[in-house]
Amino acid sequence: MDIQALRYVVTLAEELHFRKAAERHYIAPQAFGRRVHALERELGARLFDRTSRRVTLTPEGERLVADALDLLARVDALGEQARAAPGDEAGAVRVGVLGFGAADRWHELRALVTEQLPGTDLVHVELDWDSQYDAVRRGDVDVAVVHDVGPVDGLRMDLVLRAGRVAVVPTSSPLADAERLELADLDGLPWVRPVGRHPGLRAWAGPAATDTTRRSPMVRTPAAIPAAVATSGMLGMHGEPARHFYGRPDVRFVPLAGGGCEVSIATRADDRSRVAEAFRHAATVVRRDPVGNR
């Protein structure tokens, strides 16, 4: 039996809405529905009654959800015991990183973590917008430094930094010499499109998620945006620290009005390990606002 499908059933029982339940797991509603249907076929029982207006649990579904909650609690407890086993926290800690990660906070963040975890090596694992949250939830990484675009079921977010956003502009564009841009200045211009399942990414990206064409490059990591802009001649959306970490002679990073960029340390919400606590404490210490104040 598919453990993840059981998690989907439990979520659907809570939401009683396929789209909302699917969003909590960052998959398309169609794929979510197929996994639920497949489990129903495997069990030979209908777990949910569906109409065009509502979803309700069947008696069989109620019994399964009760059993699933018990089973999933035991599975999660086993995972927690394994993560807390003696010696498991010694040696290497897998740190997932999206884009520029903690930007200019890296040195201080790393020093604080290694001070709390002497003898520990931090191993870099590259993430993209699609994998940055699930990598933590699945245990592929121990912690992650993520582009925080909204709450994620099962994860705790500890803010590291906030920064403004910038438009990444080809140097050949007349906009490249602007001191600051408003969204109205960019009406009708095509954008490079960031790809990720969290709905908050689309909200953050604004026109980069809507003002695109069939020729718009799709980028899965922040690091790819400047190259995509230089290649296509289109615009890109980025966090302000990108000017320092992804600078190249054929693009400019122009301050852009609107919501900023937040970077957080992501850990499993139920993780009480020394590794998780060390990163959470370090995030609190290095946290600063956009002008560098603590």
Image (cartoon, rainbow, N blue to C red):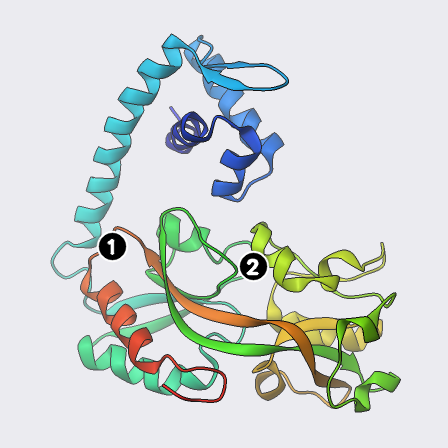
At horizontal 29% and vertical 70% (from top left) the residue drawn is: 279
Q: Residue at x 20, y 82 (%)?
A: 115
Is the residue 120 above or below the residue 31 in the image?
below
For residue 157, say whether it is visible. Answer: yes
Q: Residue at 29%, 67% (x, y): give it.
A: 93
User: In the image shown, does 75 or 29 lie closer to the viewer?
Assistant: 29
Residue 118 visible? no
- Say which element carries label 1: loop
**On screen, residue 141 above or below 257:** above
Quadrant location of the C terminus? bottom left
Identify which amino acid the numbered label 1 is placed on: Asp
Q: Nearer the viewer, residue 261 or 5?
A: 261
Residue 102: percent from left, percent from top: 44, 77
Residue farthest along the left direction in this orientation = 86
Q: Which residue is mark 2?
A: 129
Q: CA distance from mark 1 to mark 2?
A: 22 Å
Residue sitting at 72 percent across and 58 percent down? 209
Q: Which mark is residue 166?
A: none
The residue under label 1 is 271
